[in-house]
Amino acid sequence: MPPAAGPLKTTPLVRLCRDMGARLVDFAGWELPVQFSSVIEEHLAVREAAGLFDVSHMGEIEIRGRAALDLVQKVTCNDVSRLAPGQAQYTVLTTERGTFVDDILVYRRGGNEFLLVVNASNTDKDFAWVASAARGDVEVVNASARWAQLALQGPKAETILQGLLRAPLAPLRPFRFLETEVNGTRSIVSRTGYTGEDGFEIYLPPQAAADLYQALLRAGGPHGLRPCGLGARDTLRLEAGMPLYGNDVDETTTVLEAGLDGIVRLGKGPFIGSEALSREKETGPARRLMGFEMIDPGVPRHGHPVRVGGEASGEVTSGTVGPSLKKSIGLAYFPARAARPGTRFAVNIRGRDAEAIIVPTPFYRRPH
């Protein structure tokens, strides 16, 4: 018999979320809220006002020392040397084949100090991968237990958060961060997110997370802020065309196949996977991750088969009805010959072929 599954991991906010009536689910071994009211209500709150997410399950890896920059450059495909302290970057931990160990954010906290934020299900794997590549004067620490993380997302996010800290938020540009006191606790405030909206991710000690969560709900109530769960997080990120590790990208997909050419910096010098990605760039990837929308009725879901020109070509990696768009959308890999907007194909939904068409992503862009 297989060994019994261990107890679910919990964030510092699980009891508070339960008391607030959240429906909790097992997500990558963590007990997390999937929704508080409804996915659609929470999704639209983020688009129209603001939503607050507990994302304390995400992992954090701290890297410091004179060889820290060399290590981060070696294990990621983007060019971390471009970052000044106070800047962040989306990148990928790559295998020798140019595929995903994980997609991550890198924060440069100082000349020789970095914070890597990784997907919860990959934390231990990512830490082992990075640590195994370390050489020279560098320390690699799995610091996940030292950090909680809240995500405040939506057009009212800046107004809501500004009342809880002295530093002005307006000058903070996307993918920039500052280290300051929030609600009286030293924190990292980053203008990043996973929703396609303006917003912030706040990193702070776990023991201070519940107080900040409640303070944000109080401050945001008059502005329409809602607590949000994993359900809305997924529909928001898909409307924004953002990939999800385990669905859209994994160790079988290359960074170029995923359409992330812009973060593959082959000119920075050798890194893990650079030779494979250089060869693939010359020939062009054999397949591409593309966005699509349904023409026929039906909702595409992860795993639904896809056929192009009558031939099987893969399956849907992510799919939903976009609450902001009021249409069914999804992501799937297509052969290079077909991977272009305007290509029509079939998604098999419950045994029935439904017509769909490849379209540009992101599906949703916030108004300016």
Image: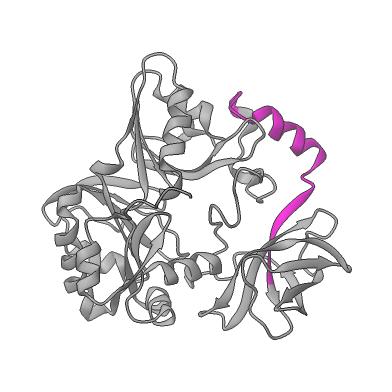
In this rendering, the answer to whether 297 lies above or below 107 is below
The residue stretch that appears in magenta: 268-292
Q: In this view, does 184 lie above or below 197?
A: above
Q: Could you say which quadrant of the image residue 13 lies in?
A: bottom left
- At 41% from the left edge and 67% from the top edge, which residue is drawn? 230
Farthest residue, direction front: 1
Q: From the top left corner, tell me how far across and down residue 187 is, in percent.
A: 21, 47
User: How many tags in the picture?
Assistant: 0
The residue at the point 58 percent across, 26 percent down is 271
- Which picture quadrant has residue 315? bottom right
Q: In this view, does 276 lie to the left or right of 147?
A: right
Q: Position of residue 133 (x, y in %)?
A: 48, 23
Residue 314: % across, % down: 75, 60
Q: Is residue 244 left or right of residue 135?
A: right
Q: Residue at x 48, y 64 (%)?
A: 196
**Is residue 278 shown in magenta?**
yes
Give the colour scheme shown: one colour
Query: Can you say whether 356 is above or below 123 in the image?
Result: below
Q: In this view, does 14 lie above or below 18?
A: above
